[in-house]
Amino acid sequence: MAIGEILLLVFVFVIAGFLGVELISKVPSQLHTPLMSGTNAISGITIVGAISATAVALHTDGTVSAICGFAAIVLATINVIGGYLVTDRMLGMFKSKQKKGDDKK
Amino acid sequence: MNWSEVSVVLTTILYMVSAVLFIRGIKLLGKADTARRGNLMSSVGMLIAVVTVLLEKKVTDTVTNGPLKNAYLWALAAIVLGGVIGAVWAKKVEMTGMPQLVALFNGFGGLSSLLVALTQYMTDGSINVFSSVALGLTIAIGAIAFTGSVVAWGKLSGKMFKKNISIPAKNAINACLAIVGLVGVLLYALSIADVVGKTVGDVGIIVTSVSYLLLGFTMVVAIGGGDMPVIISLLNAFSGLAAAFAGLAMSNSVLVVSGCLVGTSGLILTLIMCKAMNRKLTALLFSSFGASAKKGAAGEHKEPKSMSVEDAYLILEAASSVVFIPGYGMAVAQAQHAVKELCDKLEENGAEVSFAIHPVAGRMPGHMNVLLAEANVPYEQLKTADEMNPQMSNTDVAIVIGANDVVNPSAINDETSPLYGMPIINAFEARTVFVLKRGKGTGFSGVENPLFTNDNTVMIYGDAKQTVSSLVSEFDEG
């Protein structure tokens, strides 16, 4: 890794951090749970790292490391799929009075 | 251009698209009408990211390998396995089991980042000093998120660590573990810089893993149920940060962006929760609640009044405005559907009904909102403490269901109370207050609640669900 690449990564890291603060500062408390479980699903992005690391492990013939990577993909997928589905289920329950009236008719 | 260049350009653009979708998705998640679309959008971002990694040169290099060395087959098998497990859990979970499931998923995310770092540590020959530090920190944060979340899951589901185990000299132990773990990271980085031998670096990685796995355990095991909303959102922030550090170690921009977004947004949510409890994050992590809390303020001890369901019904029937104040007890009794029925009856009777929800009521941020939404309570009826408090003195009846500390007036008028300064729902200002409670006793904080002995407060002892259901049947008969 060249020094330029490292600095660019740090740059992205810091900017993304501030962006996160800006995005979340005004959220109504009723959405705290879906927000938390939705961002929790996003933290499963490590699946990308897991697939890439597994590929490297397979390329270098590391059996132990490949199994380690495999487990990482499985766990990250559980986090991603489960997280999104649970969030969607929760949000599907939040109904306004208006929409509920429509359901009954 | 050869494939390796095409691959770099293509993956960079696609990762950018997926990062934009995550940002937009989180933004939309913050508004009630668009939240579902936001979640969908961020899941599309995730799909794009996963497809993109399959186009990375490291991965495409294995396409010509035999089935046992082919990364596509490994990834497919792992995703199918994980996808099925995740989907089944997400479909099967009861809404009351939501906090522990979110905690468990979060733990898996942390463990995954930890394993990614270990895999990279075992295979990657191009690690430099910078990526070695990032890799070490990924292990540390991933480990703490993993064991911390598992302990939180155990506590929330009531399966393990139910009692708050107090560890002697907890702060000293935690500080030691944290420092020893960081020394491990340092040793590993030094071995990469060729200052010390490779074996020393290996020892460093093991030391970091072990001490931070332990730290996650010791940190969360001492935390009480009422502080769970704070600790869950903190652990969520950790698993995001672990992913971000994994991204720094592997120089993968989409990991850095999305991991960091989750990390900081989780941290903000944690601070919001802390503010709602009038606690400092440091105080929550480094001192156990109640240690300094003196139990029971001095002064006369009044016995709370109690009332039968029949008498309570007569008061409710005459009420023109009613406020429900739910707490964790409502979740335990699974009373939300019965509460909704009672709410319908009261509205038929011409009363105005609303719900006052404290930000930390329950075991995770927004816990009560989810349960009431499950029972079909429209979200316009769910009010925050700030919206509800000014109207409280015009309210005929406030019904407190399984809540305690969040309605404790000591927070306003007793400077010696450990709760002093915590924003509460001013239930005591209502003309009549019903408190539905399983039995006598204090809340999780162990602080006496003067609300219960106020002249306008009536206790209705018993299972909250049963009490509410019998109130509903009183309305049917009346």
Image: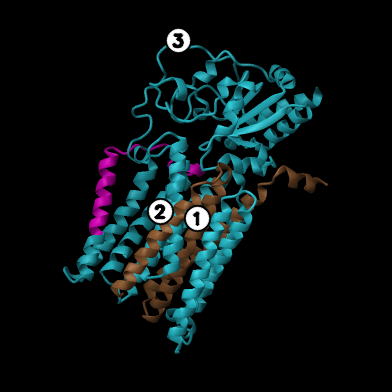
Chain colours: A brown, B cyan
Front residue of this view, candidates B343 and B76: B343
Residue B232 in view, yes or no: no
Work out whether residue B474 or residue B251 is closer to the camera in this orientation and state it.
B251
Q: Disc 2 designates what residue?
A: B238
Q: Which residue is mark 1?
A: A40
Tell which circle, 2 or 3, labels the residue nearer the N-terminal end: 2
On what subunit does the disc labeled 1 rest? A
Residue type at numbered disc 3? Glu
x 27%, y 72%: residue? B128
Residue pictured at 16% horizontal, 68% vertical:
B196
Element class at badge 3: loop
Q: CA distance from mark 2 to mark 3?
A: 46 Å
**Could you give the CA–CA distance between mark 2 and mark 1, rounded to whole angstroms?**
10 Å
Is the residue marked by circle 3 packed among few (<14), some (14-19), or many (20+) residues within 10 Å?
few
Task: Tell me the quarter of the image containing the N terminus of chain B.
Answer: bottom left
Q: Is residue B385 above or below residue B305?
A: below
For residue B350, which quarter of the picture?
top right
Task: Return the residue at label 3.
Answer: B300
Contact, CB < 8 Å: mark 2 with mark 3?
no
Element under disc 2: helix
Image position, residue B89 (x, y; %): 58, 56
Location of the C terminus of chain B (image quadrant):
top right
Q: Hey, what amino acid is under mark 1?
A: Asn
Residue at 44%, 37% in the rendered image: B275
> What's the residue type where badge 2 is placed?
Phe
Magenta residues, start to end: B156-184
- Chain identity of mark 2: B
